[in-house]
Structure formats: C-alpha cells, structure tokens
C-alpha cells in the first residue's frame, strides 16, 4: 500500500459516507490526487462509491487495519504526541458532558430534551464551549505540530465555533454538517486510529 492510498483510505474510514473533497481535506492531499486514488481503490474493491460518496468495503477495513502499525510507528513511539493525546482524552470527557448539557436540560430535577427555546441557556453552553476550545487549542497545536495533517481540525473547529457564537446553533452539534461536535468526533476517531486504540463510549 502506498502512503497516498493509506491516507485516502484512512480519510474514507473517518468520513464514512464522505465526498471526495472532504476525504481529501482529512487526507491532506490535493483533490485531484485523492479522486484518482479513490477511483483506483473502488476498482480494487477496497472502497465502495454510492451517489458520489465513498465508504470502505469490509475488505478495505481489514486491509487498512493491518497497515496502521506500519504507517504510524513513529507517531505511536512519540512521547510528546502520546502525552498530547492523553490530554485530549481529558478534555474529551468535558466536551461529552457539554454536548449532553446542550442536548438536554434539567427541569424540576429531571433531564428532558433541549428544544432550544431558552436562548439564555443555549448561550451559556456555547460560552462554556468557547472556554473549552480556548483550553484545547494548545493541545491541538501540539498534535498538529507533530502531525501537520491534523491542522484541518483546528480550522474546522474554529469555523464551527464562530458560527455558533454568531447565533447559528446548528453548528454546535448537528450531525449533517461540520458542526463542532461532528468535527471533534472525527478528530477523536483520527487519533484513535493513529494510536491503535478503541473508542471508549
């Protein structure tokens, strides 16, 4: 497997049903190169294409899983990268609680779905998300300083937070767009795959 094919398959695994442009972003490769690699991967049975979106086949999942050690040995042996990932996991627990608080509210001692009719409550959660992001930025900077491909997450997280701050609350956690939670989830998946860990949720 070439490094380019590994990156494209890795990006496809993270995006799941992703378009070529989104996979190219995560792979850190030019769009034209990514499209060519995807076409070849479809022809070889590693990737399936449905309506312009791509996903790994069962064979592709197995092949990719077997290649992670070879392509990520240096990162797995990097003590600074590992330490930054451990710090990420600490902040990740806080983010999960914030998203729970965003999606639900305490009403009379009972958790109920947040219908987002209480603007003050939503603004308070978005403010806490901004504080968390500020504390997280040095961790992501450390990670992307070691693995430059990860810089795309800083760009996407910042953009989503800006839109949420401006009042478009879908950008907090809407799964259909590159919301803050969606991008964070993908970053977590990326790091877990790099390190060979299983998501603990």
Image (cartoon, grey):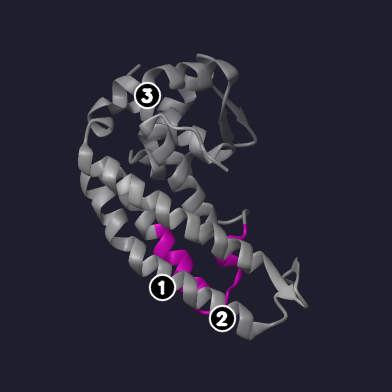
Q: Earlier in the sequence, mark 3 or mark 2?
A: 3
Q: Residue at left 48%, top 74%? A: 128
Q: Report the Cα–Cα distance between label 3 and label 1.
A: 34 Å
Tell me which segment is drawn in magenta. Answer: 156-174
Asked if residue 28 can be seen in this view, the reply is: yes
Towards the viewer: 59 or 92:
92
Mark toward the viewer: 3 or 1? 1
Residue at the disc numbered 2? 123
Element assignment for label 1: helix
Element assignment for label 3: helix
Element assignment for label 2: helix
Q: Residue at left 26%, top 42%? A: 81
Q: Residue at left 78%, top 78%? A: 108
Residue at the disc numbered 1? 131
Q: Is residue 3 left or right of residue 199?
A: left
Residue at the disc numbered 3? 68
Residue 106 shown in magenta: no
Q: Report the Cα–Cα distance between label 2 and label 1.
A: 12 Å
């Amino acid at each position: 497997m070439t490094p380019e094919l590994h990156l494209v398959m890795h990006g496809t695994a993270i995006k799941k049903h992703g378009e070529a442009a989104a996979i190219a972003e995560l792979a850190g490769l030019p769009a034209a190169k990514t499209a060519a690699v995807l076409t070849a991967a479809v022809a070889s049975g590693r990737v399936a294409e449905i309506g312009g979106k791509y996903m790994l086949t069962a064979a592709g999942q197995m092949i990719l899983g077997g290649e992670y050690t070879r392509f990520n040995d240096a990162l797995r042996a990097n003590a600074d990268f590992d330490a930054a990932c451990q710090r990420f996991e600490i902040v990740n627990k806080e983010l999960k609680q914030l998203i729970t608080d965003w999606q639900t509210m305490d009403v009379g001692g009972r958790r109920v779905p947040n219908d987002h009719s209480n603007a003050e409550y939503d603004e308070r959660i978005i403010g806490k998300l901004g504080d968390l992001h500020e504390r997280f930025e040095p961790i992501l900077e450390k990670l992307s300083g070691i693995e430059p491909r990860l810089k795309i997450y800083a760009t996407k997280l910042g953009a989503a937070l800006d839109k949420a701050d401006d009042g478009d609350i879908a950008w907090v956690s809407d799964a259909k767009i590159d919301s803050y939670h969606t991008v964070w989830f993908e970053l977590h998946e990326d790091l877990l795959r790099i390190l060979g860990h299983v998501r603990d949720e």
